[in-house]
Amino acid sequence: MEFLSYGFMRNALIAICIITPLFGMLGTMIVNNRMAFFSDALGHSALTGMALGVVLGVAGTDLPMLLFAVCFALVLNHMKRKSSASTDTMISVFSSLGTAVGLVILSRGGNFSKYSALLVGDILSITGKEILCLVVVLAVTFLFWLFCFNKLHACSINKSLAKSKGIPVRLMEDLFGVLIAVIVMLSIKWVGVLLINALLILPVAAAANISSNMREYHLFSVILSVASGLIGLILSYYLNAAAGPTIVIVAAVFFAATFFAKPLFRS
């Protein structure tokens, strides 16, 4: 295969094989806990994290975005518990504010063009060290999924019942929020602010169309996520198009196909 003769394509292929199962596992937990808007808000907050790095003079590093996203997630969880407003309303307020503040700071002096790549990402720019970082994140996510999924699922069904079973609901919500924040921020420059939520949700939504039980739901989510990533990356090479948007289009095609095939799987 011609594209494998390029080092950047080999790195991108390895990264896709790590990121997509990561998103497949995380996405099922996000959807089950009705946190799709939450992950989208975190993605948009990357702009504010980047702006914070510019203000502090440490632009170009992931640390400002990571720290801001973790704080953002914890504050948002706290506000959801304390506010009488609906969860979607609170998330929309935080998402809009985070995006606006980031854009204001980054666009001062007409310099936003330097950061516009953050909007769509560039998986082809990933390095070997960053791939190793993703391997660690994948391992941590798998362990979290293994030990905490049932507890999170119980919290999503009935928080009062979960508390009566001795599950620390607040701790689980905060740990999950921090995990989402870390993964979103570490993936954002390769996936893009505008696309990351689509890659988290579309394979999961497609898996839900053809799954008859929880085991199939998780398995199909990971399979469809990996397939979308690999097919999208290869297509983007031959079409000379951006990888992130191409992967999202493939994931959307999978969703449409599973939506219309749903009666065959449910019969």
Image (cartoon, rainbow, N blue to C red):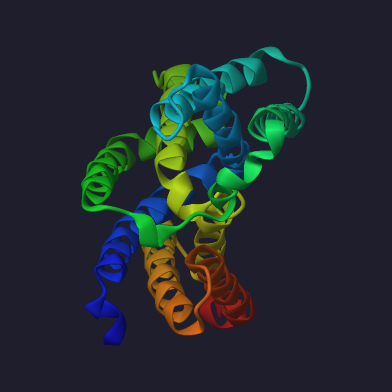
Q: Residue 31: x percent and y percent?
A: 55, 47
| Near-viewer residue (43 or 89) | 43
Q: Looking at the rendering, in which quadrant would you find the C terminus?
A: bottom right
Q: Looking at the rendering, in which quadrant would you find the N terminus?
A: bottom left
Residue 148's quadrant in the figure?
top left
Is 235 placed above or below 89 here? Answer: below
Does residue 160 appear in this view? no
Name the residue located 56 percent from the left edge and 76 percent from the top edge: 258
Is 150 placed above or below 213 here? Answer: above
Q: Residue furthest bottom?
A: 1
- Total number of numbered labels? 0
Residue 126's quadrant in the figure?
bottom left
Does residue 138 appear in this view? yes
Q: Residue 41: x percent and y percent?
A: 63, 36
| Near-viewer residue (134 or 189) | 189
Apparent side of residue 205 relative to residue 135 in the rendered image (left or right)? right
Apparent side of residue 37 relative to residue 174 in the rendered image (left or right)? right
| Near-viewer residue (115 or 194) | 115
Q: Residue 236: x percent and y percent?
A: 47, 76
Name the residue located 62 percent from the left edge and 51 percent from the top edge: 194
Name the residue located 61 percent from the left edge and 42 percent from the top edge: 40
Apparent side of residue 208 relative to residue 16 in the rendered image (left or right)? right
Q: Residue 11: x percent and y percent?
A: 27, 63
Name the residue located 40 percent from the left edge and 73 percent from the top edge: 227
